[in-house]
Image: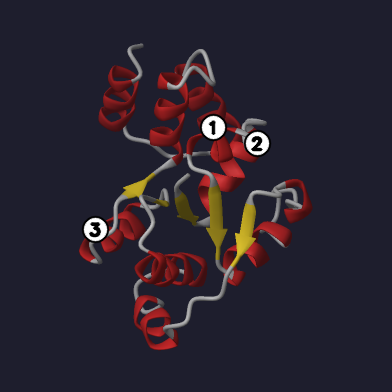
Amino acid sequence: MAVVVSDTSPLRCLSHLHLLDILPRLFGTVLIPPAVADELRAPGQGTPPLDLAVIPFCQVRVPGDVELVQRLAKRLHLGESEALALAVEVKPDVVLIDEKTGRAVAKELGLVPLGVLGALVQAKRAGLIVAVAPLVTTLRLELDFRVSTEVERRILDLAGE
Protein backbone atom coordinates (compact mmCIF):
# COMPACT_ATOMS: atom_id res chain seq x y z
CA MET A 1 0.00 0.00 0.00
CA ALA A 2 1.13 3.53 -0.69
CA VAL A 3 2.48 6.04 1.74
CA VAL A 4 1.52 9.71 1.55
CA VAL A 5 2.64 12.81 3.41
CA SER A 6 -0.01 15.28 4.53
CA ASP A 7 -0.18 18.92 5.47
CA THR A 8 -2.79 20.12 7.98
CA SER A 9 -5.62 21.33 5.75
CA PRO A 10 -6.59 18.03 4.06
CA LEU A 11 -6.71 16.25 7.43
CA ARG A 12 -8.72 19.03 9.02
CA CYS A 13 -11.18 19.15 6.10
CA LEU A 14 -11.66 15.39 6.01
CA SER A 15 -12.13 15.32 9.77
CA HIS A 16 -14.80 18.02 9.49
CA LEU A 17 -16.57 15.93 6.85
CA HIS A 18 -16.22 12.80 9.03
CA LEU A 19 -14.27 11.18 6.19
CA LEU A 20 -10.81 10.61 7.66
CA ASP A 21 -11.39 6.90 7.16
CA ILE A 22 -11.05 7.27 3.38
CA LEU A 23 -7.33 8.02 3.70
CA PRO A 24 -6.07 4.56 4.68
CA ARG A 25 -8.43 3.01 2.14
CA LEU A 26 -7.02 5.22 -0.63
CA PHE A 27 -3.41 5.60 0.43
CA GLY A 28 -2.44 3.36 3.32
CA THR A 29 -0.14 5.10 5.77
CA VAL A 30 -0.24 8.87 6.15
CA LEU A 31 2.95 10.51 7.40
CA ILE A 32 2.78 13.91 9.05
CA PRO A 33 5.60 16.04 10.41
CA PRO A 34 5.60 17.40 13.99
CA ALA A 35 4.46 20.91 12.96
CA VAL A 36 1.36 19.45 11.31
CA ALA A 37 0.66 17.32 14.40
CA ASP A 38 0.97 20.48 16.52
CA GLU A 39 -1.38 22.41 14.22
CA LEU A 40 -3.95 19.61 14.48
CA ARG A 41 -3.72 19.40 18.27
CA ALA A 42 -3.71 23.17 18.86
CA PRO A 43 -5.47 24.87 15.95
CA GLY A 44 -6.34 28.51 15.54
CA GLN A 45 -9.42 30.13 16.94
CA GLY A 46 -12.76 28.62 15.95
CA THR A 47 -11.36 25.25 14.90
CA PRO A 48 -11.61 22.24 17.22
CA PRO A 49 -8.46 20.32 18.07
CA LEU A 50 -7.95 16.98 16.38
CA ASP A 51 -6.76 14.15 18.59
CA LEU A 52 -4.16 12.14 16.72
CA ALA A 53 -5.24 9.07 18.69
CA VAL A 54 -8.35 8.94 16.48
CA ILE A 55 -6.16 8.75 13.39
CA PRO A 56 -4.23 5.49 13.92
CA PHE A 57 -3.09 5.39 10.29
CA CYS A 58 -1.18 8.69 10.73
CA GLN A 59 2.42 8.48 11.82
CA VAL A 60 4.42 11.49 12.96
CA ARG A 61 7.85 11.58 11.39
CA VAL A 62 10.48 14.31 11.72
CA PRO A 63 12.01 15.51 8.44
CA GLY A 64 15.76 15.01 8.50
CA ASP A 65 16.78 17.93 6.27
CA VAL A 66 16.55 20.90 8.64
CA GLU A 67 18.16 23.20 6.06
CA LEU A 68 15.46 22.38 3.51
CA VAL A 69 12.76 23.06 6.11
CA GLN A 70 14.35 26.44 6.84
CA ARG A 71 14.58 27.33 3.13
CA LEU A 72 10.97 26.35 2.55
CA ALA A 73 9.85 28.28 5.64
CA LYS A 74 10.89 31.48 3.89
CA ARG A 75 7.97 30.92 1.49
CA LEU A 76 5.57 28.69 3.42
CA HIS A 77 4.15 28.05 6.88
CA LEU A 78 6.11 25.66 9.09
CA GLY A 79 3.65 22.78 8.66
CA GLU A 80 3.83 23.00 4.89
CA SER A 81 7.62 23.35 5.01
CA GLU A 82 8.06 20.28 7.17
CA ALA A 83 5.54 18.28 5.14
CA LEU A 84 7.29 19.06 1.86
CA ALA A 85 10.76 18.39 3.30
CA LEU A 86 9.51 15.04 4.63
CA ALA A 87 7.94 14.25 1.26
CA VAL A 88 11.24 14.94 -0.52
CA GLU A 89 12.84 12.36 1.79
CA VAL A 90 10.25 9.58 1.60
CA LYS A 91 9.17 10.12 -2.02
CA PRO A 92 5.46 9.39 -1.51
CA ASP A 93 3.02 8.83 -4.35
CA VAL A 94 1.38 12.15 -3.45
CA VAL A 95 1.64 14.90 -0.88
CA LEU A 96 -1.71 16.02 0.50
CA ILE A 97 -1.67 19.82 0.46
CA ASP A 98 -4.31 22.41 -0.35
CA GLU A 99 -2.69 25.82 -0.31
CA LYS A 100 -1.87 27.23 -3.73
CA THR A 101 1.70 28.28 -2.93
CA GLY A 102 2.43 25.00 -1.17
CA ARG A 103 1.16 23.05 -4.18
CA ALA A 104 3.37 25.12 -6.50
CA VAL A 105 6.43 24.52 -4.31
CA ALA A 106 5.62 20.80 -4.17
CA LYS A 107 5.69 20.69 -7.96
CA GLU A 108 9.01 22.61 -8.00
CA LEU A 109 10.40 19.88 -5.73
CA GLY A 110 9.24 17.16 -8.11
CA LEU A 111 6.39 16.05 -5.87
CA VAL A 112 2.80 15.30 -6.84
CA PRO A 113 0.42 17.49 -4.82
CA LEU A 114 -3.13 16.38 -4.20
CA GLY A 115 -5.65 18.53 -2.36
CA VAL A 116 -8.64 17.46 -0.34
CA LEU A 117 -10.87 17.94 -3.39
CA GLY A 118 -8.71 15.60 -5.46
CA ALA A 119 -8.82 13.07 -2.63
CA LEU A 120 -12.62 13.32 -2.64
CA VAL A 121 -12.66 12.62 -6.39
CA GLN A 122 -10.49 9.55 -5.82
CA ALA A 123 -12.81 8.46 -3.00
CA LYS A 124 -15.83 8.74 -5.26
CA ARG A 125 -14.11 6.78 -8.02
CA ALA A 126 -13.27 4.09 -5.45
CA GLY A 127 -16.90 3.95 -4.32
CA LEU A 128 -16.13 5.29 -0.85
CA ILE A 129 -18.45 8.30 -1.16
CA VAL A 130 -21.46 8.94 -3.38
CA ALA A 131 -20.99 12.63 -4.28
CA VAL A 132 -18.37 15.36 -4.16
CA ALA A 133 -20.49 18.48 -4.78
CA PRO A 134 -22.28 18.59 -1.40
CA LEU A 135 -18.96 18.06 0.37
CA VAL A 136 -17.38 21.01 -1.47
CA THR A 137 -20.36 23.13 -0.43
CA THR A 138 -19.96 22.02 3.19
CA LEU A 139 -16.26 22.90 3.17
CA ARG A 140 -16.94 26.29 1.64
CA LEU A 141 -19.78 27.21 3.99
CA GLU A 142 -18.57 25.69 7.24
CA LEU A 143 -14.78 26.00 6.98
CA ASP A 144 -14.52 28.98 4.63
CA PHE A 145 -12.63 26.70 2.23
CA ARG A 146 -11.65 28.74 -0.78
CA VAL A 147 -11.92 27.24 -4.23
CA SER A 148 -12.30 29.08 -7.50
CA THR A 149 -15.31 28.44 -9.70
CA GLU A 150 -12.97 27.08 -12.38
CA VAL A 151 -11.28 24.60 -10.04
CA GLU A 152 -14.61 23.51 -8.57
CA ARG A 153 -16.00 22.89 -12.06
CA ARG A 154 -12.92 20.81 -12.99
CA ILE A 155 -13.21 18.79 -9.80
CA LEU A 156 -16.89 18.11 -10.33
CA ASP A 157 -16.22 17.14 -13.96
CA LEU A 158 -13.58 14.68 -12.77
CA ALA A 159 -16.10 13.33 -10.28
CA GLY A 160 -18.71 12.94 -13.03
CA GLU A 161 -21.07 15.43 -11.41
Viewer-side label of 1, 2: 2
Please provide percent x and percent y for residue 56. 71, 49
- Which residue is drawn at the image coordinates 32% and 26% (left, top)? 155
* Residue placed most toward the observer, 3 or 8: 3
In the drawing, does residue 76 fall left or right of residue 128? left
Q: Are marks 1 and 2 in contact (CB under 8 Å)?
A: yes
Tag 1 residue: 139
Give me the C-alpha separation between circle 1 and circle 3.
Answer: 25 Å
- Disc 2 packing (10 Å; few <14; some 14–19; many ≥20): some
Tag 2 residue: 16
- Which residue is drawn at the image coordinates 43% and 39% (left, top)? 146
Viewer-side label of 1, 3: 3
Mark 2 lies on a secondary structure that is: helix
Please provide percent x and percent y for residue 128. 54, 21
| Image: 103 above or below 159 | below
| Image: 25 above or below 4 | above
Please provide percent x and percent y for residue 110. 23, 62
Q: In terms of image quadrants, where is residue 62?
A: bottom right
Question: N-terminal of the two: label 1 or label 2?
Answer: 2
Mark 3 lies on a secondary structure that is: helix
* Residue placed most toward the observer, 69 or 148: 69
